[in-house]
Amino acid sequence: MVRIIAKNISKYFKKGRVIALDKINLTIENGERFGILGPSGAGKTTLMRIIAGLEVPSEGELYFDDKLVAKDGKLIVPPEDRRIGMVFQTWALYPNLTAYENIAFPLTNTKISKEEIRKRVEEIAKILDITHVLNHYPRELSGGQQQRVALARALVKNPSLLLLDEPFSNLDARMRDSARALVKEVQSRLGVTLLIVSHDPADIFAIADRVGVLVKGKLVQVGPPEEIYNKPISIEVASLIGEINEIEGKVTKEGIIIGSFKIPVNINTDKAIIGIRPEDIKISKEPIKEEEWILIGKGRVKVIGYQGGLFRITVSPLDSEEEIVTYLDHPIKAGEEILVYVKKGSIKIFT
Ligand code: ADP
Ligand code: MG
């Protein structure tokens, strides 16, 4: 277990023309499961590589516990002395090595004796429940067993820190669920500090106790998963977590007006963006009497699509080109006039 502290870390590429990381300040606690969520190009892999020691920060300091490991463009502790295990996107195993040899690989060419290597491989194999397949080649293993072998290889050196960079993005949906559960279980058994980065909020929310959101090299929000989910600080952060309708309209005392829609929110500034998730919008031909649904006005159905077992409906106010998206479990005709409702308390305001 180790505590990771980043102090004002920036990373520049191409003589400063690319700012991959911009003054990152972050502490990952001993034994914590920390997740970084960010879109492609945000700087996630760069941060991973700096922590692993494969890159140095252009500016700033990186500590492992009290030990300074890199500072202002200088590598102080090299990767091999940082006690890190890593799993990248592919979970790739060496196809011509057995499961045993794959797991033992990080220990070969070290001073560790053959007997000690055997002992360590068997130990980690036992934890991951793959003892019975150690003599198999990767092609003879199921997908789930291959993941376990890859994870065993990352853990065989008994690392203090496990780094996972988009580890599930190449797996199919079913495998992804089991891999997430496996990582979480193994982490809590070994107590290793864990840092996972992904563009997929489902990866992060499945595993992390605390989440940092990285956008264009800046850490814009850090907090527990439910806080990131319920109180995103900007529309950008909100849209990383899931689809959201971004609505900009005229602010009045009664709320935001967009054509025939009046969205009842209390805003003190004259300009605001509001966000409403598709699931917090309901459309209906008949009035809805439930109290939690607030009528915002009449709209017209513009476009209908079919996606993930639901009908994706685009609705516009009667006299405006603005569009909002919601989903229905039954089809509806384009051009139809409908009533549009918003769920009470669900409107996010960004000023
Ligand atoms: P992510 O992993 O979040 O997709 P990266 O850390 O890979 O993002 O990249 C962040 C930014 O830094 C991108 O603009 C990328 O093009 C740039 N970048 C990363 N590595 C290099 C490099 N070795 N040379 C130049 N630019 C790089
Ligand atoms: Mg990356």
Image (cartoon, rainbow, N blue to C red):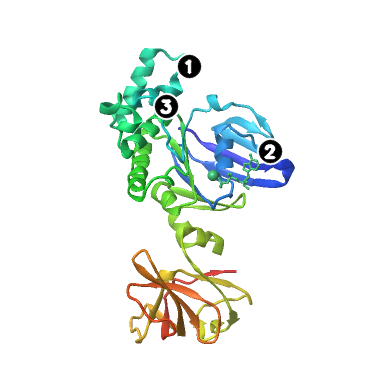
Work out whether mark 3 precedes mark 2 in sequence or the reverse, and give the earlier one: 2
Work out whether mark 1 precedes mark 3 in sequence or the reverse, and give the earlier one: 1
Which quarter of the picture shows residue 295?
bottom left
Q: Nearer the viewer, residue 274 or 239?
A: 239
**Residue 53 image offset from top left, x and y in percent:** 58, 31
Which quarter of the picture shows residue 184?
top left
Label 2, on which residue? Answer: 58
Q: Amino acid at mark 1?
A: Thr
Q: Is the residue marked 3 within 8 Å of ligand 2, measured from its CB?
A: no
**Residue 270 image offset from top left, x and y in percent:** 64, 77
Instruction: Single out the residue that lies furthest toward the right.
Output: 15
Q: Residue at x 42, y 85 (%)?
A: 336
Q: Amino acid at mark 3?
A: Asn
Q: Nearer the viewer, residue 5 or 155?
A: 155
Q: Amino acid at mark 2?
A: Ser
Q: Is residue 117 above or below residue 197?
A: above
Label 3, on which residue? Answer: 158
Work out whether mark 1 precedes mark 2 in sequence or the reverse, and give the earlier one: 2
Which quarter of the picture shows residue 147?
top left
Quadrant where the N terminus sits is top left
Q: Is residue 338 above or below residue 206?
A: below
Q: Which mark is residue 110?
A: 1
Q: Residue at x 68, y 38 (%)?
A: 58
Quadrant where the C terminus sits is bottom right
Q: How many marks?
A: 3
